[in-house]
Amino acid sequence: MVNYTLSFESIEKFVEDLRVYLTNNRVAKKEVLRSTLLVEEVMLKYRDAFGEDAVVETETLSRIWKTGVSIRIYGDSLDPFSEDEEGMLKSLTASTVNVNPVWKYAKSSSANAKGCNEINLLVPKQARVSNPVRFLITVIFFIMFALLTKMLLSEENCAIWANDFVLPVAGTYTNFLSVMAILMVFFSIPLCIVQYGSIGTFRKTAKQVLKRYILIPLGILIPLGIAASLFITKGGEAGDGYAIAKSILDIFIGMIPGNIVSPFLNFNCMQVMLVGLTFGLCFLVMGNESKTLVSIFDRCNFVAVLTNSYLARFVHFYVGVMAYYLVLTDYSVLFSEMLPIILIVVGACILSVVVFLALTCIKFRVKPFVLAKKFLPSFMVNLSSASVGASFMVFFDELVKDCGVELAYSGMAVNLGTVLFKPLYSVFLAVCGVGAAYLTDCLTFATLIQILLMAYILPVSIPNIQGGATSVILLMFSQVGIGNGMGELIVTINTILQFIIVPANIFCTQCLILLTAGKEKKVDLAKLRAAVAKSK
């Protein structure tokens, strides 16, 4: 245990010691930067409250896959995160579970002694093997194991082994993910709405940022749905006009739950979303009176996301098991039939990046190479990690420091954009859903409408971690009724495509924030048009 004071020199020394400790314990550079900035801001808040002579006790923490520090300061109760008027601490912990400190206050048993403010900060260690390499090694191992199994067992026994033993094991993992997905949907939607602060702010902002976040994915899915409708007669019967109208009506009526419990018992995601939306709007109307409830929702959401992040650590093992299953069964043939769908998704990612880059460059009269170079650092982080949380601070700094977007506006737009604006995941879910339904001969008009609705709404509940879409994909396929292992097949495809979808989506989000901020005259054009070297 090491003691410091709250003088500027001591705070600086503590931050430097923490930086060295985290770096030596394989913490990623971005998480080290975010953690040290957060600790420095916390210490300065306590300095203002208790003075520079107050003593700070620190102790290193070590957990499975994580390391960190415990900070104890004796005095009156002071939660630095609830007193975050400038929003600095919130911006450092937003959109990620990697840096999420926990504050608690312990009262002293003695009447004269002071209580203790304790802050525990844990951050994940980097894996010794990079994620792409780990995925590749796992998949190759299980494919070789599957080939060996096929050599030792007959075709009939292979099918029995795959369907009666391998698939149930994988299903246990996916069932757990589905439970977490329902919880994340329920808690994340109200928290996203509450960020607006009031109904008035909600309405004002909805006309600007929110309108584009909502309408752009809708504008992409409508032509996709029209194109997909051409395949309905090949994949199933479309039915007459009455049947079509009745199926659409049933979908919307089915969104309204019979009671507050049934959506969770039946894993009905559409109903859970409606309940979450109702809670969020009620929180806005209640204003400060809902502060306690919002805090409870925030911690519950954190637990759900944290649990999902731990489960995501085993995604590579799940992918390996599914590769093993696909080789043992005939679904390896279906995988080859899904190749056109994979190419469509990759093409949509490339086209989206080109279109958003062109629109932004034309709007602000900036050279494409200059703008692309400004966004390159966060693009590369997302390309290697497939996680928005890993690049959040880089993403934020690029908009503020390199592109000249106002700090307050950028914070609001980034926090909302990383949650709401996921058009490429909407495309992925829609294309894969339609393709899977067509290949299993169950693509009807009602199924198409249901797929498009879920592809439009569900990406909001995808956590910004690697493999976060796994639970959402399985939930969608369960709700739509596309079985025969197609959900597991799409999850396997997603583990590959997420390294393309996530960086492309974040690039488009950055461009959209720039375009929206430009319309509001909240962009420093001189800084935006300057070369990267000059903007640093």
Image (cartoon, rainbow, N blue to C red):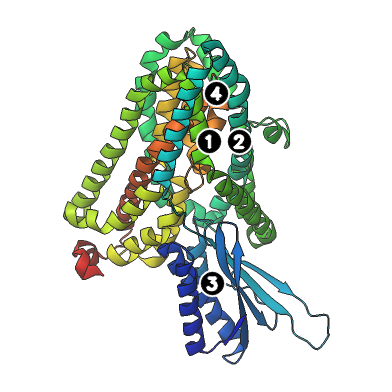
Q: According to the image, label 3 marks what residue?
A: 85
Q: CA distance from mark 2 to mark 3?
A: 41 Å
Relative to 241, say whether 469 is above or below.
below
Asked if marks 2 and 1 touch (Cβ < 8 Å), the reply is yes
Q: CA distance from mark 1 to mark 3?
A: 43 Å
Q: Which mark is residue 480?
A: 4
Question: Could you say where residue 80 lies in the image, as x and y percent from the top left?
Answer: 59, 73
Q: Quadrant of the C terminus?
A: bottom left
As helix, strand or loop, the secondary structure at mark 2 comes to helix
Q: Amino acid at mark 3?
A: Glu
The quarter of the picture where residue 29 lies is bottom left
Asked if marks 4 and 3 touch (Cβ < 8 Å), the reply is no
Q: According to the image, label 2 marks what residue?
A: 173
For the point 63% across and 52% down, the residue is 303
Q: Amino acid at mark 1?
A: Tyr
Q: CA distance from mark 1 to mark 4?
A: 23 Å
Q: Which mark is residue 318?
A: 1
Farthest bottom residue? 53
For the point 49% across and 69% down, the residue is 22
Relative to 496, say whether 521 is above or below.
below
Look at the image and tell me whether residue 125 can be seen: yes
For the point 23% across and 63% down, the residue is 525
